[in-house]
Image (tube, grey):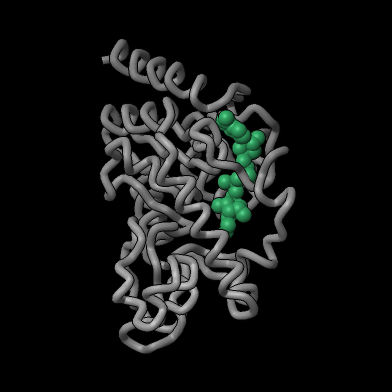
């Protein structure tokens, strides 16, 4: 069984992490142009870092839900599997999904990277204050804002993809490599409004000849292409769906 799973913010909603466009989503009250663009960061790095720091804290405190576990279970039963997630949280990784079966196409919120050169590092915990020189005594928020690249001294930024930026080439290439190996038997798209063309494109190309399943309580731009629509929350729908797929596969053997 060759499987592609594509996830968005909805898969982490039941872990208490807000979505972006839903009723209680971030973009209801916050302006993406002020928080998630390179221009916003150049204008007000403190505001941007503050938002990412709060999100890091919320994610650290969250637990993976039944949907994350179900996806990892499916990965364990598939012959060839790839998860493409738009989520910058680490909840898929925390249930044991191996790095090589997962592409975080919008980056990783726990990575801090240079805004100019290629330097980056994982800042899962608050980074050590000595890395921040004079800012060391002024609290984490200040530290992030003042943080400079140890290689080129440019400002350090969150390791995520912002509006108007290119996708990370190597990660997009990993998706392309997976697609080039052939179509999938099953493509499951979970908890995303599928706003971006590349998400729809990858889901459609992968499902050519196979089954495209959408798991989302609401209709999306992808719904009309899906062979099956599951209009339940991911943590309820996915464990059921994954068991069904595994059972149907083993009964065919
Ligand atoms: P959105 O906030 O656009 O969409 C979340 C989707 O999840 C909606 O379609 C909801 O109906 C659905 N949903 C909500 N709760 C759910 C649940 N319990 N189970 C299943 N589905 C549920 O989030 P994304 O599509 O992930 O990018 O957004 C894509 C990108 O836009 C994000 O990665 C982010 C954002 O702006 C950047 O910041 C670059």
| Residue lying at 73% horizontally and 51% vertically, measured from the top left | 29
Q: Residue furthest front?
A: 137
Q: Is residue 117 visible?
A: yes
Q: Nearer the viewer, residue 143 or 161?
A: 143
| Residue lying at 43% horizontally and 29% vertically, measured from the top left | 65
Q: Is residue 200 visible?
A: no
Ligand 1, what quadrant?
Answer: top right
Where residue 40 sits, quadrant-wise, is bottom right
Give left or right: position of 1 versus 209.
left
Where residue 123 sits, quadrant-wise, is bottom left
Q: Nearer the viewer, residue 179 or 81?
A: 81
In the rendered view of the protein, which quadrant contains the N terminus?
Answer: top left
Using the image, determine if residue 169 lies above or below residue 252. Answer: below
Using the image, determine if residue 227 lies above or below residue 51. Answer: above
Task: Residue 104 in the image: state x and y as whole percent.
Answer: 42, 53
Task: Residue 249 in the image: state x and y as whole percent.
Answer: 33, 18
Task: Residue 11 in the image: state x and y as whole percent.
Answer: 51, 35
Using the image, determine if residue 165 lies above or below residue 239. Answer: below
| Residue lying at 30% horizontally and 40% vertically, measured from the top left | 97
| Residue lying at 61% horizontally and 43% vertically, measured from the top left | 19
In the rendered view of the protein, which quadrant contains the C terminus?
Answer: top left
Task: Residue 246 in the image: state x and y as whole percent.
Answer: 34, 19
Q: Nearer the viewer, residue 184 or 81?
A: 81
Q: Residue furthest bottom?
A: 152
Using the image, determine if residue 112 lies above or below residue 101. Answer: below
Give left or right: position of 207 versus 148.
right
| Number of numbered discs overlaid on the protein picture | 0
């Amino acid at each position: 069984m060759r499987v592609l799973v594509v996830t968005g913010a909805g898969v982490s909603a039941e872990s208490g992490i807000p979505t972006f466009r839903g009723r209680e989503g971030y973009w209801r009250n916050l302006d993406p142009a002020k928080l998630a663009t390179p221009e916003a960061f150049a204008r007000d790095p403190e505001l941007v870092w503050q938002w990412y720091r709060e999100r890091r804290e919320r994610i650290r405190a969250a637990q993976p839900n039944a949907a994350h576990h179900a996806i990892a279970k499916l990965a364990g039963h598939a012959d060839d599997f790839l998860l493409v997630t738009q989520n910058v949280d680490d909840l898929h990784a925390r249930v044991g999904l191996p790095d090589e079966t997962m592409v975080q196409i919008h980056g990783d919120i726990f990575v801090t990277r240079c805004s100019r050169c290629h330097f980056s590092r994982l800042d899962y915990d608050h980074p050590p204050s000595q890395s921040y020189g004079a800012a060391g005594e002024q609290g984490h928020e200040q530290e992030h804002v003042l943080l400079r690249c140890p290689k080129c001294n440019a400002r350090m930024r969150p390791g995520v993809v912002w509006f108007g930026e290119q996708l990370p080439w190597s990660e997009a290439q990993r998706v392309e490599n997976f697609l080039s190996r052939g179509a999938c038997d099953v493509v499951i798209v979970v908890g995303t409004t599928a706003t971006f063309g590349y998400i729809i494109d990858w889901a459609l190309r992968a499902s050519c000849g196979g089954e495209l399943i959408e798991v989302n309580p609401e209709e999306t731009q992808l719904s009309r292409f899906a062979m099956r629509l599951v209009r339940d929350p991911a943590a309820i729908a996915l464990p059921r769906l994954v068991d069904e797929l595994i059972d149907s596969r083993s009964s065919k053997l």
